[in-house]
Amino acid sequence: MAYGVRLLVRGDYASFNRPEMKVERVSYEVMTPSAARGILEAIYWKPSIRWIVDEIHVLEPIAFTHIRRNEISCRIPVRGSVTAAMRGALPTAAPAAAPGIAVEDFRQQRAAMILRNVRYGIHAHLEPQAGERGAAGPQNAAQALAGHLDGFRRRARRGQFFQQPYLGNREFPAACELVEAFPACPEELRGRRDLGLMLRDIEFTPDERGRIIESHRGQRLSAEAIFFNAVLYDGVLRLAPRAARLRPPEGAL
Amino acid sequence: MILQSLHRLYFRLRDEPAYEVPPPGYSLQKIAFVVVLSPSGVLREIVDARYASSGVARQMRVPGAGKPPGSGIHPGFLWDNTAYIFGCPSAEASAGRALEAFHAFRRRHLELQSAILSPRFAAVCRFLEAWRPEDANLYPEIAAAGPGFGVFRLEDDACYIHEDPEVDRWWQRQREQSRPAETVAQCLMTGQAASIARVQPMIKGVCGGKPQVTLVAFNDTAYESFGKEQGFNAPIAEEAALAYATALNALLDGPMRHRHRTVIADMTLVFWTERPCLLEDVFIRFVAQGSRGLLDDAGSAADAPLKEKMRTFLDLLRQEREPGPRAVTSGGASAAENSIGAWILGITPNAARAVVRLFLPTTTGELLRHLREHHRHSRVARRFVADAPEPEPEFPPLPLLLRQTARDADAVPALFIAPYLSAVFTGARYPEGMYAVVLRRLRCDGDISYARAAIIKGYLIRNYREEVSVSLDNHRNEPAYRLGRLLAALEKTHTDALGRPGVSLRNIFYGTASSSPRSVFPQLLRSYPWHLERLPELRRQERESLIEEIMEPLTGFAPHLSLVEQGLFAIGYYHQMQTFHHREPAATTEPVRKAG
């Protein structure tokens, strides 16, 4: 069942990082479907629904710029220091295992080729997620979805969100607006433009040896990146519906 | 997009023998020595394989990829350095490590004794079985072979042992057998599920930084995500990774690199097209040298066809309109082939990584159009043409233009290189900051060179939408322009009168005259009549009427000039000086023109 929403997203900078150029970041030319999903989920999401992005409209010419930022090269190790601290080990007792990093020892400068002055239109719809807590039964499915959509529209209209929607990196906030129709694409994006393979989304599959843990169920998952052929037709990136991978239904929740 | 374009390039380069791209499973290595064995495996001699004239090692196609990065032991197959072949310690390998390497090398070959039925390979096995690393002392040639790799040969053979047909056949066969796929995922370049490379191959030939850098690497925990490690963060199939790295290495470091690669300050610029064409032949040379390459007649005869192509290309650039069915291909095919894909890539090293600073997928037609536009915007009349000692090129090379932003050649701010080149190649606006920097250099040293005038004119036309002529415009009444002309005329009078080329008005006064004219010009105009008196009669009248004509529309001197006006000032100055120079080329005592 498809109920669509149209969200206009604007920002000064955006960086939809290519997986292969992730260290010295290079952005994709347009917004990735996973970034679009991220913006929608930042505004409204429940475990019982899933956002499916149908179209991404590119409404400003594609322009890049180059920046350099100081970052750090390591992560705070969870298993050693953070879990020990959670169990009550005092940092003074074992300073080497303190849950922190001395930033000056790990500073790294990383360059990035990012997008400038972006504006996108996201056309997406909701799908119910079976087997989740709060999911409606089949008779109420349509009603439940309508309720979710109303919730999304209400929040989007008021500018509410769970966390600030962003364009690729959290440093690049997005201004969102609910609209009825998108403006036309700029002149230079008319016609067909092949963008090559682009990241569609990350799919998570249950895996006992996976290193990612679902926060609401504690299940182990492993991630897999899915790519698709991205072609812009008159500035519109259309996403073919992907056969949804159904999660195996859990036992009684 | 970047890796995908390089991947496509690989398939083109593979079919062109001039690039010496090795087929998959082989690599090109620099071989410094040859180990000559008897058929029973006794070491006969060690022959130097370097080119006698230059001492440069010989490039040969050998089985296996190059040495991977890191400090593990990776014995080559029928090729390696003295530590692996002889166990001889050297500058790179301590005695213990050399021993370890030798044993690994021996093991790798002896394991295959029964698999490869070739008398030549058997000779190598016999040699390795019998050899003791201590024997290296008996053969001083081993230590003399130095760093670098060596291959094997039987004493009466012409070919090397790794080229033996049976060995080759075995090598191809064992490559084709499907290896157990360790990790299979969708490759982001081909879209197909394939075995993913854990470590990407290194790129050579990026100027600055380490000799080998990686384009795609995740060597710290901060770069990993979704629980993936190393190369699995960016799933690229092993074959695809090898393809793109080989293609890029061929462009940067291969025998045809002069055609594809140039270095501008700290950025290595690479250029390639979908198929061979005129633009590919001349583009890099044009970027690096402008039209300077044509100005000198020195150069070998082999250069002649290239110069001819350069001439054709420059003619195309001079045209005001798009060419009709004229093509940008070699051989002048009649079909309009302005839509050949072309790619420009600019890489800078950052420690052991390569940063992509510029990537422009475009077509030959588009590129030509934008180059033409850049030339039209920045063209100014030249002062020194053909017979002068340092003639100015009609098409200034881009590094020369970028050089104007700094006092020393190695201090060019990296900030401007990529955006300026991007503007030249895509027709975008020039980077705003660079204009102010060039004007600042101008104020510091007062040297209005051809290159600086070209940059300023480009900015005024493209960024600030002014209309600026190529040479002197007598009817232009803008105060800033007239003031520039005035300074030039006053300076010329000063130099003509006193004949001292060392110290000129512009060295002292240019900076202040261009930014706050009111504080300088009254003073200059006060001393001007004394200089005027010392000129010969005819010239005095000429000069006087010229200065009157320049000053006629001026109603006063502005206290400050904006950046745009300072640019017009500089152009006015340049135009006037250029006119003076042209009217009296021999007699002009132009102060020493600083190079670049």
Image (tube, rainbow, N blue to C red):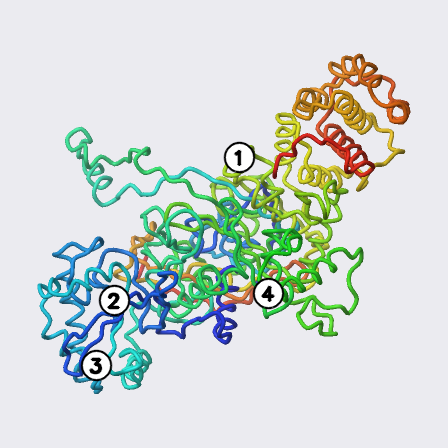
Q: Mark 1 lies on which chain?
A: B
- In the image, is residue A62 above or below residue B518? below
On the same chain: label 4 and label 2? yes
Residue under label 2, please give it: B80
Which residue is found at the position 63% from the left and 33% from the top? B438
Asked whether residue A32 appears in the rendered view, the answer is no
Marks 4 and 2 sit apart, C-alpha to C-alpha, by 39 Å
Q: What element carries label 3?
A: helix
Pick the front one: A12 or B119? B119
Report the residue marked by disc 1: B408
Using the numbered discs, state the Cα–Cα distance from disc 2 to disc 1 in whole angstroms.
43 Å
- Dot 1, crowdedness within 10 Å: few (<14), some or many (≥20)? few
Label 4 sits on residue:
B301
**Which percent across, then down, holds residue B477?**
87, 29
Q: What residue type is labelled 1?
A: Asp
Q: What residue is at 68 percent from the left and 48 percent from the top?
A: B393
Q: What residue type is labelled 2?
A: Asp
